[in-house]
Image: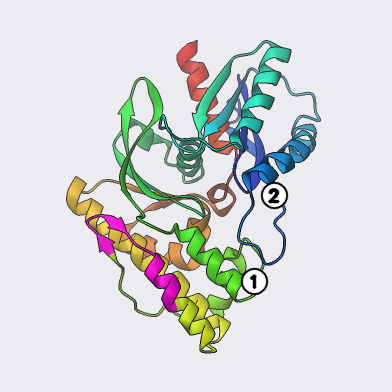
Amino acid sequence: MSVVLGIDTSNYTTSCAIYSSEDNTVVNKGKLLPVKAGERGIRQSDAVFHHVNQIYSLLEELLKENIKIDAVCASVTPRPQEDSYMPCFTVGESVARSIKAALNVPFFETSHQQGHIMAALFSAGAMFLAKEPFLAFHVSGGTTEAILVTPDDGEIINCEIAAETLDLNAGQLVDRIGVKMGLCFPCGKELERYALEYGKLPLVKAVLKGCNCCLSGFENKLTEMISKGSEKAEVSAYTLSYVEATISAMTEKLLEKFGKLPIVYAGGVMSNTIIRKSLESKFGAYFAKPEFSCDNAAGVSLIGYEKLLKRD
């Protein structure tokens, strides 16, 4: 049996998770970073400060039963690319390396994006996909990308960007419009609640350039709706409709390009039940459960376990 601690300090959530191979379970503890009312995000310096102040209490809660840790893994970058960097991830890396030194256990690195994809595979009961090519969408406030994932002996989740946004991220669109309507940041849950009041998603047309997407034009249209006095339910429904139509159109283009590959959707935006229901009916895709869609350290702990197996 092996127990691996995973740590992820993303731009909006501090999270720690324990994976136990004995019963194949993950326990994740997370806490959102505080964002002031009316603001649409948080500065990196503030994110680092809040992670430092939050992480110890999560670890105390997670490890209160004196669990023996066999390895520790942290997301140290947003994506598995050389130029990928955000200061907030240095907090998780520093804490993980300190635990490694104190306990004399192996330390492994991964990326936030790889953790998201692994968490989605685990929660969807689709870990078998890690041994074959598949397409994974990572859709959040900081990322709107389609990833071609292929088997690689040297990497647990081998990622290559297949398509991406050329301007706004989907989560940015949701939060910017939500804040303009007076909703609390992050705005996804409230926006979904209002959209459900409106009913079905309106028909809209996605804007693509090849397989890539553009979302900034939709922000202008939605802002105009708000200025003209449209109800929150209507604006919310149109916002989610633009996101769904965009992800759907990107998926169709990518399936044309790469063939009929399995599709996995991950990231906070993909926890939206309206978008999920529509995409499931179209593509029969795999989705992370809501608690594994938003930022979490579950996938990081799972990647750490897989790297521990390779090391042994």
Looking at the rendered structure, the kind of residue marked 1 is Leu
Number of numbered discs on residues: 2
The residue where tag 1 is placed is 183
* Residue toward you, 105 or 38: 38
Q: What stretch is highlighted in magenta?
A: 208-221
124 falls in the magenta region: no
Kindly identify the residue that appears in the image at 25 percent across and 55 percent down: 211
Relative to residue 161, is residue 266 drawn left or right?
right
Q: In this view, does 93 lie above or below 283?
A: above
Near mark 2 (Cα within 10 A), the count class, few <14, some 14-19 or many ≥20, is: many
Kindly identify the residue that appears in the image at 46 percent across and 77 percent down: 222
Q: In which quarter of the image is residue 71?
A: top right
Tell me if I can see residue 119 in this picture: yes
Residue 96 x %, y %: 65, 24
Q: In this view, does 15 lie above or below 267?
A: above
* Residue toward you, 25 or 203: 203
Looking at the rendered structure, the kind of residue marked 2 is Leu
Question: Does dot 2 land on a helix, a strand or a loop?
Answer: loop
Residue 210 x %, y %: 22, 56
Kindly identify the residue that appears in the image at 42 percent across and 33 percent down: 83
Say whether disc 2 or disc 1 marks the residue closer to the N-terminus: 2
213 falls in the magenta region: yes
The mark found on residue 33 in the picture is 2
